[in-house]
Image (spheres, rainbow, N blue to C red):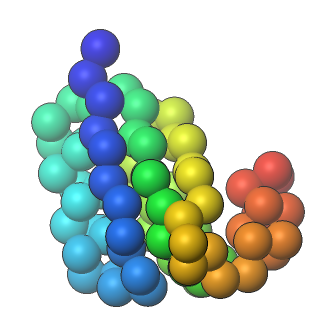
Amino acid sequence: MHIAIISDSHDHIPNLVRAVNRANKAGAEVLIHCGDLISPFMLPYLHRFHGQIHLIYGNNAGDQHLISSRCAT
């Protein structure tokens, strides 16, 4: 099983898109984001990943409640 591990996106869309694309191209089945996604508007870019996603809050989690509610759906 291939696992992609990323962190500290800090609302930087181009870096997150690049990381997700590389994970997809490498055939990763699971993506773990180890903190600091920051804002809910980043979720659609994270959801471009073709496998299972695990999101961990960091020390700059932004709106944790909204991120959690959007991840649950």
Judge by depth and name the residue closer to the eye, 72 or 37: 37
Task: Relative to 49, say whether 66 is above or below.
Answer: below
Q: In the rendering, at what x and y percent does residue 55 appear?
A: 57, 51
Judge by depth and name the residue closer to the eye, 27 or 10: 10
Residue occupying the far top of the picture: 1
Q: Is residue 50 visible?
A: no
Determine whether, in the image, residue 14 is placed left or right of residue 42.
left
Q: Pick the quarter of the image with the N terminus.
A: top left
Task: Relative to 1, say whether 3 is above or below.
Answer: below
Judge by depth and name the residue closer to the eye, 30 or 48: 30
Q: In the rendering, at what x and y percent does residue 33 appear?
A: 44, 52
Q: Residue at x 36, y 60 (%)?
A: 7
Determine whether, in the image, residue 27 is placed left or right of residue 55.
left
Residue occupying the far front of the picture: 59
Quarter location, residue 54? top right
Q: Residue at x 17, y 51 (%)?
A: 22
Q: In the rendering, at what x and y percent does residue 53 appear?
A: 52, 42
Task: Relative to 7, say whether 17 is above or below.
Answer: below
Q: Residue at x 24, y 75 (%)?
A: 15
Q: Residue at x 32, y 54 (%)?
A: 6
